[in-house]
Image (spheres, coloured by chain):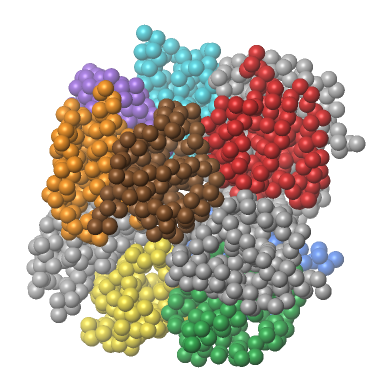
Chain colours: B blue, C yellow, E orange, F purple, G brown, H green, J cyan, K red
Amino acid sequence: MKILVINGPNLNLLGKRKPDMYGHRTPEEVEKFILKYFKEVELKFFQSNSEGEIIDQIQKADAAYDGIAINPGAFTHYSYAIRDAIESIRIPVAEVHLSNIAAREDFRHKSVIAPVCIGSVAGFGAYSYVIGIQALAHLIKRKSE
Amino acid sequence: MKILVINGPNLNLLGKRKPDMYGHRTPEEVEKFILKYFKEVELKFFQSNSEGEIIDQIQKADAAYDGIAINPGAFTHYSYAIRDAIESIRIPVAEVHLSNIAAREDFRHKSVIAPVCIGSVAGFGAYSYVIGIQALAHLIKRKSE
Amino acid sequence: MKILVINGPNLNLLGKRKPDMYGHRTPEEVEKFILKYFKEVELKFFQSNSEGEIIDQIQKADAAYDGIAINPGAFTHYSYAIRDAIESIRIPVAEVHLSNIAAREDFRHKSVIAPVCIGSVAGFGAYSYVIGIQALAHLIKRKSE
Amino acid sequence: MKILVINGPNLNLLGKRKPDMYGHRTPEEVEKFILKYFKEVELKFFQSNSEGEIIDQIQKADAAYDGIAINPGAFTHYSYAIRDAIESIRIPVAEVHLSNIAAREDFRHKSVIAPVCIGSVAGFGAYSYVIGIQALAHLIKRKSE
Amino acid sequence: MKILVINGPNLNLLGKRKPDMYGHRTPEEVEKFILKYFKEVELKFFQSNSEGEIIDQIQKADAAYDGIAINPGAFTHYSYAIRDAIESIRIPVAEVHLSNIAAREDFRHKSVIAPVCIGSVAGFGAYSYVIGIQALAHLIKRKSE
Amino acid sequence: MKILVINGPNLNLLGKRKPDMYGHRTPEEVEKFILKYFKEVELKFFQSNSEGEIIDQIQKADAAYDGIAINPGAFTHYSYAIRDAIESIRIPVAEVHLSNIAAREDFRHKSVIAPVCIGSVAGFGAYSYVIGIQALAHLIKRKSE
Amino acid sequence: MKILVINGPNLNLLGKRKPDMYGHRTPEEVEKFILKYFKEVELKFFQSNSEGEIIDQIQKADAAYDGIAINPGAFTHYSYAIRDAIESIRIPVAEVHLSNIAAREDFRHKSVIAPVCIGSVAGFGAYSYVIGIQALAHLIKRKSE
Amino acid sequence: MKILVINGPNLNLLGKRKPDMYGHRTPEEVEKFILKYFKEVELKFFQSNSEGEIIDQIQKADAAYDGIAINPGAFTHYSYAIRDAIESIRIPVAEVHLSNIAAREDFRHKSVIAPVCIGSVAGFGAYSYVIGIQALAHLIKRKSE
Amino acid sequence: MKILVINGPNLNLLGKRKPDMYGHRTPEEVEKFILKYFKEVELKFFQSNSEGEIIDQIQKADAAYDGIAINPGAFTHYSYAIRDAIESIRIPVAEVHLSNIAAREDFRHKSVIAPVCIGSVAGFGAYSYVIGIQALAHLIKRKSE
Amino acid sequence: MKILVINGPNLNLLGKRKPDMYGHRTPEEVEKFILKYFKEVELKFFQSNSEGEIIDQIQKADAAYDGIAINPGAFTHYSYAIRDAIESIRIPVAEVHLSNIAAREDFRHKSVIAPVCIGSVAGFGAYSYVIGIQALAHLIKRKSE
Amino acid sequence: MKILVINGPNLNLLGKRKPDMYGHRTPEEVEKFILKYFKEVELKFFQSNSEGEIIDQIQKADAAYDGIAINPGAFTHYSYAIRDAIESIRIPVAEVHLSNIAAREDFRHKSVIAPVCIGSVAGFGAYSYVIGIQALAHLIKRKSE
Amino acid sequence: MKILVINGPNLNLLGKRKPDMYGHRTPEEVEKFILKYFKEVELKFFQSNSEGEIIDQIQKADAAYDGIAINPGAFTHYSYAIRDAIESIRIPVAEVHLSNIAAREDFRHKSVIAPVCIGSVAGFGAYSYVIGIQALAHLIKRKSE
């Protein structure tokens, strides 16, 4: 099983940006942290600050992966284009957030992405990725049975 | 480690109510499904249709459990009293939903509970409980280390 | 045919509370007034000030009655938990109000219950129950034919 | 006792328009269906697609009828002119809807007519007229006693 | 100088409808009351409950009158079609109201007609017409000088 | 193929009203302009300032025409009754506007008619009718093939 | 009969400020223009840029005048303190505006003063004062008869 | 004179929950603190996390007490059922809050309870109860004189 | 201990303005009524209809008084300048209202002053001042201990 | 005459994405379908998922084309940057949509692009491009005459 | 060149009020700080807590100064009267704020003054005045060239 | 000291786009105009129409510059991704606008960028850059002292 992990804008700054909120691990350390939980799932990581590149990647993933775990960063709150991309593909997508967005600024309370995902996870730090991918894998497996 | 799983109103009807949305498992079957994933965590289940009883239970859990996984059902959207109860205790609480509430009626898009939880999970069916509890356990463990 | 009539919070005060709006009959007198209109329908009355008890009752009624006529009182305007209970059962539910809620305070103009009922009646005093039950009975009969 | 039944725009299309929502009976069949329930009440039916004609009719009815049962169709949601007409006359008016407008599009949730009626009925198909007229007759009788 | 006075829906009920708010004079008495104030201005009165007829009349008045004083009744609050008609003609239009609409129901606080009139008068009973027409005449005179 | 072109309130003033916005052609000239583009489509024109008459016409057109091109004028923004009429018939309806309503006053930004049409055209002056009718004809033809 | 004319902030700049909107007359010329219309009414003029002074003046006028004509300038849109002052006195108050505030910026569409006045006039330039005072005088006379 | 003090959800946690906001006294200590201020007023304390039980208590208090001081906790912001209960009884009710709710989260700024109370006190910690009860006693005494 | 009592606009009209709402006592009688409750607290009264003078007074009080009890009248609802003044000083301020503002017009439901006060009292007539000052004195005393 | 057709995000997925809504033709087939309608107009097609690239293209088109037909995809609803680009160039731009966006999700009802276009077409599938380009060509021709 | 610097309510408390936000300099020190940057510009400082006095000053400045730099304090957010004063004069006005109002309370995010100024500066402490005046001087100079 | 000046979408069109609003200088001329004001500050200019590239640049600038002056163009109003980028870096950022955005279309009144900048300047044309950079330099210098 192959799952693509997409990280949106500014997530390349992990470890530097607001460590109290996003944790002290760098992107590489977060990847390692996640990888050690998955043996049977092949994970690939992609990060971009560009909405267009993320859309390109989502479109391409349809043929190459079994599912996507996406942390759209700030695009969560306004990128209807990413939403349309997710709605256009056939593989399932799970939304993942490091911080508990419901407990932050007002503009972060609404996700325009969530309605087209199969589910979402928020607030458990890097562990959000672990359980988001796990749930995705669980679902893909059940469907393919 | 002891975790209390609280289910809010109408979740006793699982398996009967909108099976396409909530799944075909009865509450007992959901409990069994969850339990098989946890060996080192002692799980206790509580369900009530009464806001007051859920608040009582949250308050009592503070002394008896290490964390709470709560699916507040429809109370998610207006029970500021449950929110206050969660904010009043010291053990961490994770919000859990069977369905992807962001993809349903407008009134279900806002959770008044989420801002006082450590994190939330939605949309993965009964598996939402599994990963919510897992994340909670992960967090409790890390804190106690 | 068996129909359960559920009265929500403060409806036990009928005859005392705002008689110009709700009429001078006590709950017992209202019941009598209603009963004399129905010979072939078995009516049972239930009143509670507790949201949880009303939900319990709705759930139980599913197996024991052919329909429910409910006056949710103030719960009309915010109890999404009662709404979910009604949506979860198979027997039809009719919403009934003594006063014309559209002509009162702003917060009373919106019913969160109505969208999951088959129909609603408001403004005809105790006679609202009579025609609400009658419509319910008409519908149940037609379906069972 | 004489009651005027007013039907607003597009209600002349009954039986053709969205039969799943409005039923399969033509306007004539609906009239027959209603008439068979009333022996002591003289019913007259009026339909128009024109707001002005409906207002004219409401004004004239004040001297000629004991009450009005009105299904304002789409005018329900914006005709403050019909509202003013109803508020200007002395005979009681009951609002009647075939479908459960609370369960349909957002714009149908608000009735600008309801606040000036004595009561309203919605959702019971053609039977809504039957119980609306019945309630109106009940009220007129009680007043004249 | 010729001025057309247009009265909208339900203004034919003057003297009957809410006399405390609209006064005890019948339409004929109001006309007489107004006429005695004007010697050099030729006044013509038109009333209709139909939006379409009022629009027709406004369009025709463009060639036949020097100005219009209009009390659009409830159309004040939603008839963008009457607004467009007024905006389409060249003669000036003054908005006139018997009651102080700012002191009544919320929906009466907004006039969609006012922005395309040269001015408006409200709250002085039948005398509102007198001063509205007077102001209109003053303006027409000044322009023609 | 027969298509009915319906023009709403104040569109009989074309050429006079705001020529910079609506063009200098009179209604007759606009009709001629449109007609010269269609040889195989039989076009009939209807204009009214009355909402009721437009509804009557829409209802009658169902049996007599293959499609309707409608410019509802100001009714675009509030006539839910016209919307219901369009939704009630079986032939396709295209919405047409001379001016670019999105670039004008706020109240013109929302069309209550558009959601029940098959498509809409705005901003191309009299040519909006040409392409709206053309698209309608294209669609009718394809369906009948 | 004595009437006080109160002018709010920036109305001392008449003739200088936006002459296309407010006219070319200076405050003194406007006063003269108004005075020539009234022989039996004693008029006194007061202008201030200070909300507090206007309130003081309104309070004092209660004992010394028979009525007030007020153009509250920008205070129209937010001074609940002036509103309270007007509501606290017994003599009638008429609201007067030079320009048609309904046709200007959004914030000018709402008057917090109007609901406590007996009536209001807007859009007729300096003539608005003339007819506002005239209506006030008409009313005071009728009351004292 | 007998006054009932009702405490809503989570107020049994006083001393534990957010001591910086709610103070360090336990419920028992708060009761003692209050009691020492009143000699002639008989005080009874009731706390519940259940909306229904609070309504029951308010209804019963009508016959047994001279007034109620209520701190509805989070129910302040949405319990229209408690509001109706208060509106239904004849004895006066004063609303009391420990913290200054106007200075906290947005959802705490609106009280649905306040409009049916005679008055309210907020922000003075446990002393809010003292002055709320005192004002209630003052009022009851004055009425009975 | 010295406390300054500040009264905002129109409160000099007490006894005259809406006596059913504000009581029949004149400002002098209210002062006497209040004074008789306080022996150890030196009270000074200040009233103004001018926002600027009230701000001046608040600023000066910082050095001369131990606390302020303020009834900002209508300024309660929009004077962010008074709010800033209160936030800028070090002595505590209590908000006081004669009437229950939550039960009156919509615009009175929001206080822009309350968030920067230590607490607020409303609805107990002149007695609101008594308990507001008392609470303030209680707090000042406790702090100075 | 040269016209550039710009397609926004996810329009490269045509034929795959929601074929019931967007049709079964691939982008290449849509291009062919459009091309066969135009002989005298030279059409060039550009698609991108990147907002920045679309802006670049719009800017460059100003010197190289006579007009632009743009389907901004999801950017329709929030890209004020694309709006500014269109407003900055001199050649006319027509907005084109395959589906009837007024009949879909709420967020699709508002176009931030439309106000700066000369006109817009929606709902006629691939034929929307045909008539949009045709209208654009008609306009360009008329201007150059 | 002569520029008037106007400071609104509570700005006389500089150095005392919230020094972390507004800095530690007293008003005199701020004036000195500003003055040392300007040699060719004659600066005059005016501060008032009274809206009326600020309006008076703005009006007078029109004849005596070449420009105004204004920090309206809390009046920024609601004084439409100051806005009108600024709009009424011919000399340019620049809005200046010490703190970054966009990063503070919601009510501070909207300036009713900004739309009638030529520009605005916020967030650079006392240096905001320096650059605001500098920009104003730059503009005045360029115009007079 | 090194400061990066970032220009957002469509700012490469300066001199061409709406010269009355944005001035007649080309981007190169604007750069020259700015540069001549700064001797001790090293300025570098960057422009892009792509949100992603701007984020990349902001991230890189953190290590290479002492501060950023940004004119985000239309991204000002919706790019939460750029906002997050600014919030993630340590060097100070100043927001700069050529035009007075508060005086333009509604959507331009809100900046999602401003709350995370240290300050903002708008309305002074190219001179906005000069004073924005100057303020930034002033601040950086003061901090490094």
Q: Quadrant of the C terminus of chain J?
A: top left
Q: Quadrant of the N terminus of chain J?
A: top left
- Report the residue at 20% width, 50% height from top: E11
- Report the residue at 54% width, 42% height from top: G49
Compare residues H88 and F120 and report the one nearer the observer. Answer: H88
Residue H86 relative to residue K120: left or right: left
Residue J93 relative to residue F55: left or right: right
Residue J38 relative to residue H37: left or right: left
Residue E12 place in picture, x, y as percent: 16, 51
Q: In this view, which residue lies farthest toward the top?
A: J145
Number of numbered labels in the structure image:
0
- Report the residue at 42% width, 29% height from top: G25
The image quarter in which residue E138 lies: top left
Compare residues E25 and B52 and report the one nearer the observer. Answer: E25
- Report the residue at 59% width, 28% height from top: K62
Residue J86 seen anywhere in this rendered image of the structure: yes
Position above or below: G61 against C102: above
Position above or below: G17 against E27: above
Residue C55 relative to residue G123: left or right: right
Compare residues H109 and B8 and report the one nearer the observer. Answer: H109
Compare residues F125 and E116 and report the one nearer the observer. Answer: E116
Residue E66 place in picture, x, y as percent: 21, 29
Residue F23 place in picture, x, y as percent: 30, 21
Residue F46 seen anywhere in this rendered image of the structure: no
Residue J144 place in picture, x, y as percent: 40, 9
